Image (cartoon, helix red, strand yellow):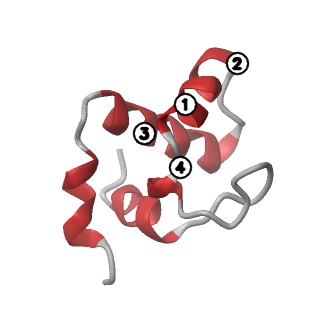
Amino acid sequence: MDPQDLQRLVTMTMPYGKYKDRVLADLPAHYLAWFAREGFPQGKLGQLLALMHEIDHNNLRSLLDPLRGR
C-alpha cells in the first residue's frame, strides 16, 4: 500500500454514481460492501475503494480522522 492512499481516502471524491462528489472516506458501509460483492472498479479508484472497505469492515474509520483537513 502506498502511504499516500490514506490521504487520498480523505481528499478524493467519488467520480460517479449515487454518491458522486462524496469523499471516499465518507462513503456508506453498504455501498462499499456492494462493491466488494459485485467487484471493485479497475485502477486506482478500485484500489482505494477496496482499502476503504477493509478499513470500514475492521471498524477503523477513526484512524482517518487525523488526516482530515490537512
Q: Residue at x 63, y 25 (%)?
A: 34
Kindly report the distance in space between the C-alpha atoms of the residues bearing marks 4 and 3.
Answer: 12 Å
Three-letter code, disc 4? Leu
Q: Which residue is mark 1?
A: 30
Callout 3 crowding tier (Cα within 10 Å): few <14, some 14–19, many ≥20: some
Kindly report the distance in space between the C-alpha atoms of the residues bearing marks 1 and 3.
Answer: 15 Å
> Which label is found at residue 27?
4
Q: Relative to 22, does residue 56 appear above or below in the rendering?
A: above
Three-letter code, disc 2? Glu
Tell me the quarter of the image containing the C terminus. bottom left
Q: Residue at x 57, y 22 (%)?
A: 36
Residue 60, quarter of the rendered image = top left
Q: Nearer the viewer, residue 37 or 51?
A: 37
Q: Which residue is mark 2?
A: 38
Q: Relative to 66, does residue 70 appear above or below in the rendering?
A: below
Does dot 3 land on a helix, a strand or a loop? helix
Kindly report the distance in space between the C-alpha atoms of the residues bearing marks 2 and 3.
Answer: 15 Å
Callout 2 crowding tier (Cα within 10 Å): few <14, some 14–19, many ≥20: few
User: Sequence order check: which comes first, mark 2 or mark 3?
Assistant: 2
Mark 1 vs mark 2, foreground winner is 1
Outermost residue, right side: 17
Q: Residue at x 44, y 55 (%)?
A: 25
> Which label is found at residue 51?
3
Does dot 4 land on a helix, a strand or a loop? loop
Q: Relative to 13, does residue 40 appear above or below in the rendering?
A: above
Three-letter code, disc 3? Leu
Q: Nearer the viewer, residue 22 or 9?
A: 22
